[in-house]
Structures are given as C-alpha cells and as structure tokens.
Image: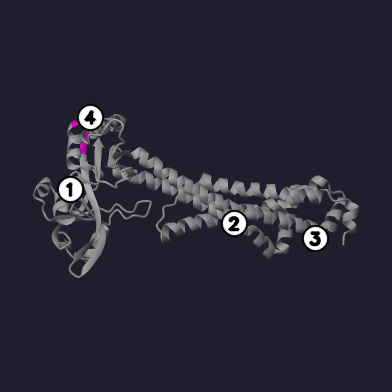
Amino acid sequence: MSFLWLTVLSAFRVLRRNPMRAGLTMLGIIIGIGAVVAMVGLGQGATVSVQAEISSLGTNVLIIVPGATTVGGVRGGLGSVSTLTVDDAQDIEKKAVGVTGVMYASRSVLQVIRENKNWSTAIMGTTPEFQDIRNWSTAQGHFFTQSDMDSAAKVAVLGKTAAQNLFEIGEDIVGGEIRIRNVPLRVIGILASKGQFVSGQDQDDIVILPFTTAERKVLGTQFLGTVGIIIVAMESRHDIPAAVEDIRELLRARHRLHPSDEDDFTIRTMEDLAKTMAGASRTMMLMLMGIASISLLVGGIGIMNILLVSVTERTREIGLRMAVGAKRAHILLQFLIEAIIMTAIGGVLGVAFGVGSARLLTQVIGWPTIVNVPAVASAFLFSLAVGVFFGLYPANKASKLNPIEALRYE
C-alpha cells in the first residue's frame, strides 16, 4: 500500500477522533463556499433576467423621457418637467430615418374599483401601437383601436395581476366594468402575462387606457398633449446610432433650444439600459461575494488554528515517527493532507449548501438563479486552495520539530 494512501487513511482517523471539532472547523468553509455559489447563481440569473427584460421591450427601440431642465438657476431632476408632447412623437414618426413605429404614454398610480373590490395599480394611457412595439399580446378580448383613441372611448385593457385582484375566479372579465376616479370603463381585453422585472416590479399589475381617455377623463394633465415617455421602434438595430442623433436634432429644433442649452429630454437605447442594469447586478454580486469571502478567510484561519493545536497535541507522536525513520517531507505531507481533506469535505458540503440556497431563493422569493458547473468547480477548487494555504504553516512547523525534544514533550 502506497505511502500517500496510508497518509490519507491516517488523516481520516485523526479527524474521526474529534468529529465535533472537525465539523466546527469546516463550518466557515461550508458557509463561505455556499455563499459564493449562491451569489454567483443569483448574479447569473439576474443577468439572464435583464436580457429577457430588454428583449421584452424590443431590441430595436429607443426610449425618450423628459430630461433635466434648469429654471431660475435650479436644475431639476429627470422627468421633473414634462417637456415631451404628442406632436413631438408624431413628428419623429414622420421625419426620423428608419422609424417603423412610435408610441407615447403617460402613467400614474391610482385606485381602481370593481363593485365591492378596489386595487391600487399603475394606470397607463397610451396608443394602439403599444401592443406591437412592446410585443405584448392579449390573452382574452382585444386591444383598443385607433377609433377608440379618436373618440376617447371609456375602455380599458387589464394586466393579469390587476384582473385577478378586481374580479372573482370564473367571473367574465371581458365586458365587465371598472371605475377609476368615478369614471366607468368597460374592460375589452386582458393582456398575456409578462411576469416580474428583476427589480421585483410586476409588469402585469397595470391597467391600460387609450391615451386620449386617460388624458381627458381619468389621469388629467396640466397641459393637454404632454406625455411622460415616447418609445420609438426602429427598422434595424444598426440604424439606432444615426437615429439617436437625428431625433436629438429634431427635438432640439422643436423645443427651440439654443446650442449652448442642455437637452431637455433623454434618449436611451436598450444597450444603455442593459449595460446599466448589468453593471448594477455585477456590482451587487461582487459586493456580496466579497462579504462571503470573509467566511472563507475565517474558515481558513480556523483550520490553521486547529492544526496548530493538533501539532501541539501530537508532538510526541511526531517525534516517534521521526525517530523510526519518517522524513520531514512525510510529516509536512501528513498535516497538509489533513487540511486539504477538511477543506475538501467543507467544499463539497458548501457547494451543496449554495445550490440548495439558490434553489430555495428561487422557490420562496422568486429570484432567478442559474448554477453552472464551472462556478461550482471553481468554488470547490478554491476551497482546496484555502486548505493548502492555511495548512502550510502548521504543517511546516510540525515538520521542523526536533525528534529528541518532541519525544521529551509532556
């Protein structure tokens, strides 16, 4: 039987002498590796969710929102002043190059009443192009038409969450009536479910009205024709950079801005949003992984301390082994293998803990998680590296003991 195999068996026998101490020593490794695996899973899941959200908005779209303005020396925040209008949107559709469709909208959060039920939800007034640009189909009924827009018809399309909270199960929703600010609205359709944003916001918790209905009868506005957002659909994503400059020049001309004035609007592309959201997710993941790495450091220090105690407890044993012919390399290898075994067991349990935690978060909280093999393998190898690094000092100390002094040790 090889020396290495005998050393491994000897290490397991030593660990079995005090399983409680060995278990507590490995606890830091288990928590640290588990936290790293869970955080990587959450980070990758968040990245995929961000990509899915961007796709749900459309890859070839531009988002234009009211921008910062300076009034009386005071600079307002994004959206502090409504600087976009219906005419702006219509002009973009007519004059901007590569544009295939434009929608505009205003949004507010209000109480919706259905008989004896009420529900606070997002109310959006928009145009019939909403469905095509957002790629959002109806599960029941139909979306409103341009004729509904022109006549400011009192009709509404509900998101799945809003419908579930306003109507009883089995009740006919399409054709039913809801009230917003005492304005009766007939439900003509229910949108297909979109699910949650990675931020946790429920996309289906919404009621959509024709823009004219929302503006004149429900939401109201200080100035008729102002909008909160304009979304522009492009023929190709390759047209987006040129379209951004084209639209910027068009809006600056329409808003009569001096060349030295800042834009009173902001144009965002899907790539900009993706980079911003992915950057935020990456920063959060790295921060959490940094915190988790502290557990690995604590676990490694714990292993080093326990091995130092073990060296002291087994001084006579070490001296006896040296006296019968064991070399310094043999003693060094023995203690290193003990450290590696502890971190390997801790790594395996930590990976299982991390994968289980990620799955639990997905089931309980609904956070998306993706645990892949490279991340698990890297975490396990890192645990072995921790064992080697923190086990080297005690192992080296044991190997340098003087055999005669070790045999005399009480």
The magenta stretch is: 95-101
Instruction: Check disc 3 and give the amino acid type.
Output: Glu
Q: Around disc 4, counting alpha carbons within 10 Å, would you say few (fewer than 14), some (14 to 19), or many (20 or more)?
A: some
Q: Earlier in the sequence, mark 4 or mark 3?
A: 4
Residue 389 in percent (x, y) is at: 69, 47
Which residue occupies the extreme bottom position in the image?
116
Instruction: Count the numbered circles shown.
Output: 4
The local secondary structure at tag 3 comes to helix
Q: Amino acid at mark 1?
A: Phe
Q: Is residue 247 visible?
A: yes
Q: Is residue 55 left or right of residue 358?
A: left
Q: Would residue 130 be visible to someone looking at this image? A: no
The residue carrying mark 2 is 30
Mark nearer the N terminus (4 vs 2): 2
- Please identify, in this view, whether the residue under mark 3 or under mark 1 is nearer the observer: 1
Residue 97 part of the magenta-drawn span = yes
CA separation in Å, label 4 and label 2: 58 Å
Describe the element under mark 1 as helix, strand or loop: loop
